[in-house]
């Protein structure tokens, strides 16, 4: 993603005041607990919200929401980039969007064979727990969704 | 006085020890650098999580009067307490492990509540497995490679136990990494999460006045946020302790190398002196022998 990081101070994670981000751009910051994965300017971001897909354009109202495992898409010019993410949060602030995820996977990180195998296991598991508590069912479904997203990104 | 051969042997053995301590110091320094990098890598996430919590806190979620907004925020009278003791897997790092263990013992003695232990790191696990304080779980090989998934699993277990009322509070005692030369023994509360923790920022939040749209709701976000907050805290403690362990080992091995150097110097001096004494004695014997013949 090196080509896309046009932000001058991509190392800094502090909030960039609105005037440093062009009005027609969004600053996308994607971080997980292990690393800062992305800090880039783009035109549009689509997120897998807990309550459905959600698109964010520059000038979006301040927003704080939860994410479910799925595919995060961001567009720079005519270029589409896709990242598989697990659950987390997103926060839209003036001039940008912060996304906090438990982990994220770019197309190059995905080992399709291994993921497919795991997905089979996860699906079986999610069917077997369905009678138990709603939390463990949700956790199992999330695992399936996260793996499906990885496959989608890779495919 | 020791014989010359004994002295020579002694010097050689000290030299070998010195080489080992020197190598260990260098290994610790390299590992320290890696741990420090990981601490730095975790910081953006911590900062961002902090910002999100600040927005929630400024919105009044979590710090509502009377009823706690989430079971993980609820404070109870402390009757049963879980104490997480974070040590290293290995020794040879100065007082790193003993400090933690001593502090843990002190807390066990002084807490008015029933204490159970959660042990992270082999040293503490071995020490407390032979004591009478009950142990909830012992993780012996966490520090081979500290992974976020390990922290997640531990945090999930803690949160669940806390919400179900198994414990009324969860504390952790560990070595906090400050600089390569300084580690601070730290005693912290992990659960319940105190709203002050959530709010403690630099106070300069960018746009606290902005009206946020919450999806699905501030409470639902808080419910997703708190487990991650605890997990991040566990992860941070593990990384900190690991970095501190390497730093402590580096310092310990550095002084061990210095001690070995001093010892070698001292022994070499004694060796040379006794060698010289032996030569002198021999000469005197030869000279006095020939003098006796001539006389």
Image: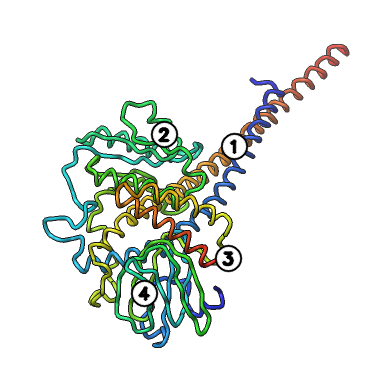
Q: Nearer the viewer, mark 2 or mark 1?
A: 2
Mark 3, mark 4: which one is toward the viewer? 4
Residue B93 versus residue B68: which sits nearer the camera? B68
Numbered label attached to residue A108: 3
Instruction: Give the colour scheme of this rendering.
Output: rainbow
Residue B143, horizontal then vertical, whole percent: 48, 44
In-image side of B293 versus B122 (left or right): right
Please identify, in this view, whether the residue under mark 4 or under mark 2 is nearer the observer: 4
Crowding near pointer 2: few (<14 within 10 Å), some, many (20+)?
A: many
Up/down of B234 relative to B61, above or below = above
Q: CA distance from mark 2 to mark 1?
A: 31 Å
**Residue A29: x percent and y percent?**
43, 72
Q: Residue beneath label 2, please?
A: B125
> Residue B112's spot in the image, x, y percent?
19, 35
* Lower sequence index among marks 2 and 1: 2
Closer to the camera: disc 2 or disc 3?
A: 3
Q: Which mark is residue B260?
A: 1
How far apart marks 4 and 1 lie (CA) works out to: 65 Å
Badge 1 and badge 3 in a common chain: no
Q: Are marks 4 and 2 in contact (CB under 8 Å)?
A: no
In the rendered view, does B116 fall on the left or right side of B65?
Answer: right
For the N terminus of chain B, which image quadrant? top right
- The residue furthest left is B66
Pointer 3 chain: A
């Amino acid at each position: 993603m090196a080509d896309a990081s046009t932000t001058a101070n991509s190392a800094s994670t502090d909030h960039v005041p609105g005037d440093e981000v062009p009005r027609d751009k969004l600053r996308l910051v994607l971080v997980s607990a292990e690393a800062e994965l992305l800090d880039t300017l783009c035109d549009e971001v689509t997120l897998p919200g807990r309550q459905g897909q959600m698109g964010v354009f520059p000038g979006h109202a301040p927003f704080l929401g939860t994410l479910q495992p799925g595919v995060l898409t961001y567009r720079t010019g005519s270029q589409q980039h896709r990242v598989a993410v697990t659950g987390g949060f997103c926060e839209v602030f003036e001039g940008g969007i912060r996304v906090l995820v438990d982990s994220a996977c770019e197309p190059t990180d995905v080992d399709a064979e291994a993921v497919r195998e795991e997905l089979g296991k996860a699906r079986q598991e999610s069917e077997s727990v369905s009678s138990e508590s709603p939390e463990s069912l949700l956790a199992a479904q999330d695992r399936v969704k996260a793996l499906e997203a990885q496959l989608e990104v890779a495919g | 006085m020791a014989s010359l051969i004994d002295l020579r042997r002694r010097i050689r053995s000290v030299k070998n020890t010195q080489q080992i301590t020197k190598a260990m110091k260098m290994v610790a320094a390299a590992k320290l650098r890696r741990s420090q990098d990981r601490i730095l890598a975790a910081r953006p996430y911590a900062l961002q999580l902090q910002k999100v919590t600040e927005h929630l806190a400024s919105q009044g979620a979590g710090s509502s009067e009377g009823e706690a907004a989430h079971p993980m925020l609820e404070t109870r009278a402390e009757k049963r307490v879980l104490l997480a003791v974070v040590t290293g897997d290995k020794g040879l790092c100065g007082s790193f492990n003993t400090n933690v263990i001593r502090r843990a013992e002190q807390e066990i003695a002084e807490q008015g509540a029933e204490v159970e232990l959660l042990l992270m790191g082999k040293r503490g696990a071995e020490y407390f497995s032979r004591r009478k304080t009950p142990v909830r779980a012992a993780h012996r090989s966490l520090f081979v490679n500290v992974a976020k998934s390990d922290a997640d699993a531990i945090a999930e277990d803690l949160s669940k136990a806390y919400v179900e009322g198994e414990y009324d509070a969860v504390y952790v005692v560990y070595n906090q990494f400050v600089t390569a030369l300084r580690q601070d023994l730290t005693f912290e509360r992990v659960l319940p999460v105190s709203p002050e923790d959530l709010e403690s920022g630099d106070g300069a939040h960018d746009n606290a006045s902005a009206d946020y749209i919450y999806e699905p709701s501030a409470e639902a976000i808080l419910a997703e946020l708190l487990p991650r907050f605890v997990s991040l805290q566990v992860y941070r403690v593990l990384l900190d302790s690991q970095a501190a362990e390497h730093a402590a080992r580096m310092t310990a091995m550095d002084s061990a190398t210095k001690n070995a150097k001093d010892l070698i110097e001292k022994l070499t001096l004694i060796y040379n002196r006794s060698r010289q004494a032996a030569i002198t004695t021999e000469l005197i014997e030869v000279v006095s022998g020939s003098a006796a013949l001539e006389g």
